[in-house]
Image (cartoon, helix red, strand yellow):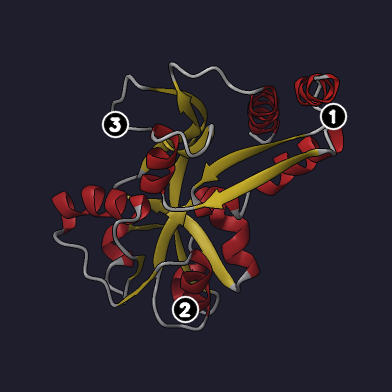
Amino acid sequence: WDNTEELLRQRFTLQMGRVSIAAMPSFAGNLLPAALKVFRGRYPRVNVAVHDVINEQVLEMVRHRRVELGIGFEPESSSALLFTPFYTDRFVAVVARDSPLAKRSEVSWEELLREDFIALQRPSAVRLLLEQAVEPRHGKLAVAFESHQLSTIGRMVANGLGVSAVPSLCIGQMQELGACCIALVEPYIERRIGLMMLADHTLSAAAQTLREVLIENARESR
């Protein structure tokens, strides 16, 4: 009993523990590491499992209690989930550095779609958002190349295979891969990104503390 009581005390005081979080790849690979570094610095004995999965799987994992926290696009509507917005993300165009478009301060969808388009594969939320926004004005999105990974898309664009559009939180990643990002207009595509948890769930001490760090870090990075 004494040993069990001590383990519970350590978990409650965050001297040990484990927390699982699901995050869509565009966030997991760009902004999440900085927040985890802050969390690790404060609570070095709490382990974090990160599931970098597409937005739809983030929602599913939270709803089925496979993780306590999820990061992704704001759900259309769900009373079962509590959503805390981090910021509103606006999509940007991704082009090769030697493309004539790279010299522009902005590009319209009409101009971008004259090039071969590279997209994330369905059922990616990014792909669905693009299709929903573009089709009313420009018809069905014609896709020349598809990939499951943003890093692959960045490399394809950098090597001159075509153009793409990604959330602005991916700008640093795209630039590291050798591509160039510019403002994308007509139409603007925006969506709130934030933190999700079950509305009726009381978070563990580790998850609650991680939630606080994520919100704090998101505010500081604006």
Residue 171 % position (x, y): 57, 56
Horizontal arrangement in the rendering, residue 207 relative to residue 86 (left or right): right
Q: CA distance from mark 2 to mark 1?
A: 45 Å
Residue at disc 2, secondary structure: helix
Horizontal arrangement in the rendering, residue 154 relative to residue 35 (left or right): left
Q: Quadrant of residue 120?
A: bottom left
Q: Is residue 105 something that shows in the picture?
A: no
Residue 201 % position (x, y): 49, 19
Q: Residue at x 50, y 69 (%)?
A: 102
Q: Residue at x 40, y 60 (%)?
A: 165
Name which residue type carries label 2.
Met
Give the label on residue 76, or none. Answer: 3
Residue at disc 3, secondary structure: loop
Please tell me whether residue 132 is drawn above or below residue 150 in the rendered image.
above
Q: Nearer the viewer, mark 3 or mark 2?
A: 3
Q: Nearer the viewer, mark 1 or mark 3?
A: 1
Residue 86 % position (x, y): 55, 30
Residue at disc 1, secondary structure: loop
Q: Which residue is mark 2?
A: 156
Please tell me whether residue 40 is drawn above or below residue 151 in the rendered image.
above
Name which residue type carries label 1.
Gln
Circle 3 packing at 10 Å, graded few (<14), some (14-19), many (20+), is few
Q: Which residue is mark 1?
A: 15
Circle 1 packing at 10 Å, graded few (<14), some (14-19), many (20+), is some
Q: How many marks?
A: 3
Q: Closest to the observer: 95 or 10?
A: 10
Q: Are marks 2 and 1 in contact (CB under 8 Å)?
A: no
